[in-house]
Amino acid sequence: MALWEKPTTGEKIVVDNGRLHVPDHPIIPFIEGDGTGPDIWAAARRVLDAAVEKAYGGAKKIAWYEVYAGEKAYNRFGQWLPEETLQAVREYYVAIKGPLTTPVGGGIRSLNVTLRQELDLYVCLRPVRYFDGVPSPVKHPELVDMVIFRENSEDIYAGIEWPAGSEEVKKVIRFLQEEMGVKKIRFPETAGIGVKPVSREGTDRLVRAAINYALKHGRKSVTLVHKGNIMKFTEGAFKNWGYELAEREFADQTFTWAQYDRIKAEKGVEAANQAQKEAEEAGKVIVKDSIADAFLQQILTRPAEYDVIATLNLNGDYISDALAAQVGGIGIAPGANINYDTGHAIFEATHGTAPKYAGLDKVNPGSVILSGVLMLEHLGWQEAADRIYAAMSKTISQKTVTYDFARLMEGATEVKCSEFADRLIDNL
Ligand SMILES: NC(=O)C1=CN([C@@H]2O[C@H](COP(=O)(O)OP(=O)(O)OC[C@H]3O[C@@H](n4cnc5c(N)ncnc54)[C@H](OP(=O)(O)O)[C@@H]3O)[C@@H](O)[C@H]2O)C=CC1
Ligand SMILES: O=C(O)CCC(=O)C(=O)O
Ligand SMILES: [Mg+2]
C-alpha cells in the first residue's frame, strides 16, 4: 500500500535522449529536510514561486509534491528513506531537498549519499561565486568564480568500511596480510578499515561533464584536483584518466598539461609555453591538475587561476565548504546532484542541518534558494532564475541580511530567515 497520495495536479517532465521536456506546470518532488530544513525550505519555496509568477505572469507554475526522507519520514512511516521517495525522483526526474542529518560514528548511513547512489547522480555540481557586499574573510573574494564538479558515487565516501574489532574487519586484515602481502602497515586490533574505489568509468563521466560545462559556459580551464602522489592507483589514476579523456574526446577543444609535459620533454620549455599560449588564444580549455593540499592553499592565495574544478568525492566535500567560506560562507552555497545521461537531478544546499538553529527561523535560506535557482536554470526557466539572482544582489546591497552576514557587516539590519525571503520577494 502506498504511504502517501500522489499529486493530482501538474504534469510530468519527460526526458528524451537525455533532454528535458518541461511542461508549464511540472510536478517537482521536494524533501523538506531535518534541523533548519523546514525554515529554509519554506522560505525558498515562497521565493521560487514568486519569481516564477513574476517572470511568466501565471503561465508557468511549479506543482510541488512533498516526498519524505529523514526524521519526518521516520516519524510518520517508520522508514528513513521510503522507496516511494526514490521512485518519485525516478518518475519526475527533477527534485529539490533540504539537508538531512547523518549521525557520526554509528547509526544510519547518510541518506544524502544514499539518494545520490541510488539514482546514480554522479556529478555534485557546486558553483561558487561572490555577491557584492557579502562579508568575507579574504581580501579579494570577487576573484573566486569557480564551479566544482565533485565525483558523487565513488571514493572512500561510498561507505565501504568495517568497525574496529568486528569479525568483518578481522577478515579483511587477514586477507590483506596473508593474501595481499601487506606487511609494513601496522594493523592493531583497534583498526577500523575503509575502502576507496575509484574507476575509470566514474572518472570519465565526471571529467566529461566538467569539460562539457567549461566549453558551454566559455570557461578557461578545468583543474583535476587529486592526491595522486600518495594514493597512486585511485587519485593518481583519476588524474591520468582525466587527461586521457580530454585528449581522446575533446582533442580539438582542449590542451592538457600532459601534452605540455610531452612537448617540454621533446622540444623544451619554450615550445611547451608557446603551445599552451596558442591553445589559449584559440579559445581551447586548458586541462591542468593540482595536488589537493597545494590546491587548498592556492585557492586562498591565487583564486583567479582556477575556474572549473573536477575532483573526487571527499576532496570535493572539503573544497566546497572551504570555497564557500571564501565568498561569505555556507549560507549562500548552492548545489546540484546530476546524472547528465538519464536527466535525473536533485538540488540541495552545500551546508547541513545546522541543528543548533533548528526551528528558530534564523539561518540564511540563500543556499537552498540558490539551489532552486540552479534548478530553474536546469528546467530552462532562465527568466525566473535571473530575477532571483538580481533580487539576491539587491537585498544584500541593501544590507538586509540574516545573522551570518549581519555579524560581519557594518550597518546591517539583521532579519529572520522568513523575513529575508520577504525582502527577496519585494526585490524580485
Ligand atoms: N547534504 C546534506 O544534507 C548535508 C547534511 N549534513 C549533515 O548536517 C548535520 C550537521 O552538520 P554540521 O557539520 O553541523 O554542518 P552544517 O553545515 O549543518 O553547520 C555548520 C555551521 O555552518 C553554518 N551554517 C549552516 N547552515 C547555515 C545557513 N543556512 N545559514 C547560515 N549559516 C549556516 C553555521 O555556522 P555558525 O555556527 O558559525 O553560525 C553552522 O553551525 C550532520 O548530520 C551532517 O551530516 C552536512 C552537510 C550536508
Ligand atoms: O550526508 C551528509 O550528512 C554530509 C554530506 C556532505 O557533507 C556533503 O555532501 O557535502
Ligand atoms: Mg559537505
Image (cartoon, rainbow, N blue to C red):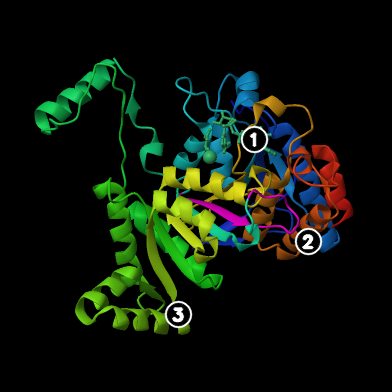
Marks 2,1: beta carbons within 8 A? no
- Measured as percent of width and height from the top left, residue 423 is found at 87, 48
Towards the viewer: 33 or 379: 33
Precedes in sequence: disc 2 or disc 1: 1
Sort mark 2 into few (<14), some (14-19) or many (20+) by Cα contacts within 10 Å. Answer: few
Sort mark 1 into few (<14), some (14-19) or many (20+) by Cα contacts within 10 Å. Answer: many
Q: Which residue is mark 3?
A: 280
Sort mark 3 into few (<14), some (14-19) or many (20+) by Cα contacts within 10 Å. Answer: some
Give the residue at x 85% y 40%. Answer: 415
Residue type indicated by callout 3: Glu
- What label sits on residue 390 in the rendered view? 2
Q: Secondary structure at mark 1?
A: loop
Q: Is residue 244 left or right of residue 151?
A: left
Find the magenta span and give its range: 122-137
Which mark's residue is nearer the viewer, 1 or 3? 3
Towards the viewer: 423 or 123: 423
Give the residue at x 28% y 60%. Answer: 240
Q: Which residue is mark 1?
A: 67
Give the residue at x 65% y 54%. Answer: 375
